[in-house]
Every structure is written in structure tokens, then in C-alpha cells.
Amino acid sequence: MKTKVVNLQSGRTFVKNGIGSRTVNEACRYRCIQFVFDAGQELSEHTAAVPAVMHFLEGKAQVRLGRRTLTAGPGTWIHMAPHQPHSIKARTRLAMLLTMFVAPDEGCHCGCQSKGKACKCSCGCKKCSCGRKR
């Protein structure tokens, strides 16, 4: 995997009355996405099939994890097991980094399966978990 340095504060574009996202980095075993929310915006309850981590960078949010509700702010780090119901409501402008992890036998997040393109895995494994060689 090549070394990559990203400034998570630059390139943030808050969308008035909306939610924005950008992929920060991805490889065959993980995908990092930065989300920005305007105050009052929310993602309704949903689940992910893979383990994930939410790392809050700026602002305040109400996070619901199943039946548990908590307030998240800068520095809050939340690990979620696969299929954990969760929702997020921004109390103020909010920036969060989401990392989704994929086990070797659970497929690939590089996009090659869904888009039919050559694998763009950057971990140096020479082959994605989907079976395609780079």
C-alpha cells in the first residue's frame, strides 16, 4: 500500500441544508469516507453489512445505536459491529470520518465488481478479494 497523507480539514465543503461526502482513501480491505452535515440534517436509521468506525472531527451530533442514544463531538470514536442499526442527527455543522472494513472473504470495496473496471486496489496485494489481478 502506498503512503497517503490527507488533510481532513481542507476540502470540506458543507452543503447548506444538506449532507456531503467524499472518499478519502480506499483499498481492498477498507474504505474511508468523510461526511459533512449542515446543522439539523440527519441520516435515518440504517445498517451496514460490514464493521465500521465513526470518528467525529467537528461539531455535535446525536447518534443512535440500536436503543442507545449518545452525544458525539470532536474526538468521539464509535466502532459498530456488522448490522448494527444506527442513525445520526447533526446538532451543529458536523464533520465525521467513516471507515468501513471488509474481511478477505466478504468481497471487495474497490468498485471492480460493480463497475466492471480493472481493480484499483492500492494495498500491494496484487489481487483483490474479488479475484481480479491488478
Image (spheres, rainbow, N blue to C red):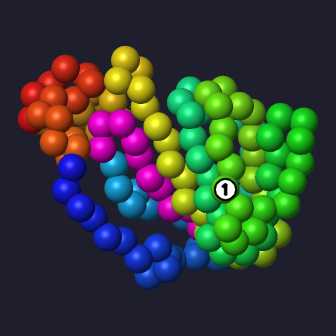
Q: Residue at x 82, y 46 (%)?
A: 64
Q: Quadrant of residue 92?
A: bottom right
Q: Residue 98, how many percent across, how many down? A: 55, 52
The correct choice, above or below, for 122 with respect to 93 in the image is: above
Q: Which residue is mark 1?
A: 77
Q: Secondary structure at mark 1?
A: strand
In the rendered structure, which segment of residues is drawn in magenta?
Answer: 27-39
Q: Is residue 38 magenta?
A: yes
Q: Residue 82, how many percent across, how many down? A: 61, 28
Q: Residue at x 75, y 40 (%)?
A: 86
Q: Is residue 84 visible?
A: yes
Near-viewer residue (6 or 33): 6
Q: Is residue 66 magenta?
A: no
Give the left or right position of residue 122, taking residue 110 as reference: left
In what quadrant of the picture does the C terminus appear? top left
The correct choice, above or below, for 47 with respect to 121 in the image is: above
Give the left or right position of residue 68, taking residue 13 as reference: right
Name the amino acid, label 1.
Trp
